Image: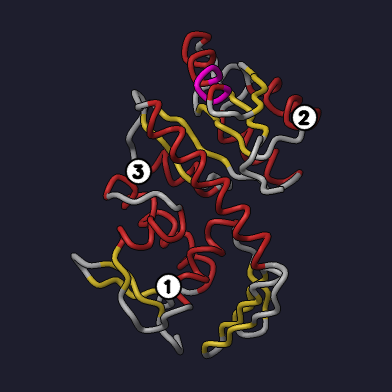
Amino acid sequence: MSVSAGARILVVEDEPVINQAVTDRLRGHGYEVVQAWDGPGAVSQFTETAPDLVLLDVMLPGFDGHEVCRRIQAARPVPVLMLTARDDEADILVGLGVGADDYLTKPFRMRELVARVGALLRRVDRAAELATRSTTTDLGDLRIDAASRRVWVAESEVHLTPTEFDLLLCLAASPGVVLTRENLYAEVWGWPGASGTRTVDSHVKALRSKTGADRVRTVHGVGYALEPSA
């Protein structure tokens, strides 16, 4: 059975009206939903219910969504969709840096939220399928083991978040080929459209910081390409 079918989702949002509206919509699409309204409650619910995905507001009582994300990702990697009222790149980078996979800026459309939830869950299914194969890619001093989801640079292991790994794997499938931000967002996040291009940019920055500044080449106005022998 795939993760996306009947998945359990933890909704963390301190505004009761938004929390219940999101919960009702997700339940209407066949998901099992558990709720939390503050930072400590979110961590507790995560431990008790083992959700397949977390919808996480940034501004929370107790401690904020960034700290929640840091704690739950340290316990068990899980897809996290951040909900933020601030469309600020620095704030978004913090969220992505602690393990969030994507973000939505408030106010958001429920249809888009449901679509992104479905896309993130389908990624989990694809990753599980890929793990059954034995595929290793060597590009210069970069080695990617798709089955174990491990990466080495110059024989030193590099720890990537699930989304960073998927992005690197996508770029490595066509070394030297320029992929547009829109194509990367559609392929890695499973959600087509230009609305996610800043998410791609933020993840590329994180990927460069871990694998080398010259690893991913920017083609201005177009997209990114992985250098075969950085």
Horizontal and vertical percent position of residue 132: 72, 69
**Amino acid on which disc 3 is placed:** Glu
Choose mark 2 or mark 3, whichever is in front: 2
Main SS of residues in magenta: helix
Considering depth in this image, is 105 or 154 the residue closer to the camera?
105
Find out whether the residues at labels 2 and 3 contact each other: C-beta distance under 8 Å. Answer: no
Q: Residue sitting at 64 percent across and 82 percent down?
A: 136
Circle 3 sits on which residue?
Answer: 89
Q: Is 22 placed above or below 188 here?
A: above
Q: CA distance from mark 2 to mark 1?
A: 39 Å
Q: Position of residue 109 (x, y in %)?
A: 35, 27
Residue that numbered label 2 is attached to: 49
The quadrant holding residue 230 is: bottom left
**Which of the two labelled residues, at mark 2 and mark 3, occupies the earlier sequence position?**
2
Q: Which residue is mark 1?
A: 213
Direction left: furthest residue: 221
Residue ID at (66%, 76%): 145
SS at mark 3?
A: helix
Q: Mark 3: give few (<14), some (14-19) or many (20+) Cα within 10 Å.
A: few
The boundaries of the magenta stretch are 23-27
The residue closer to the viewer here, 90 or 10, is 10
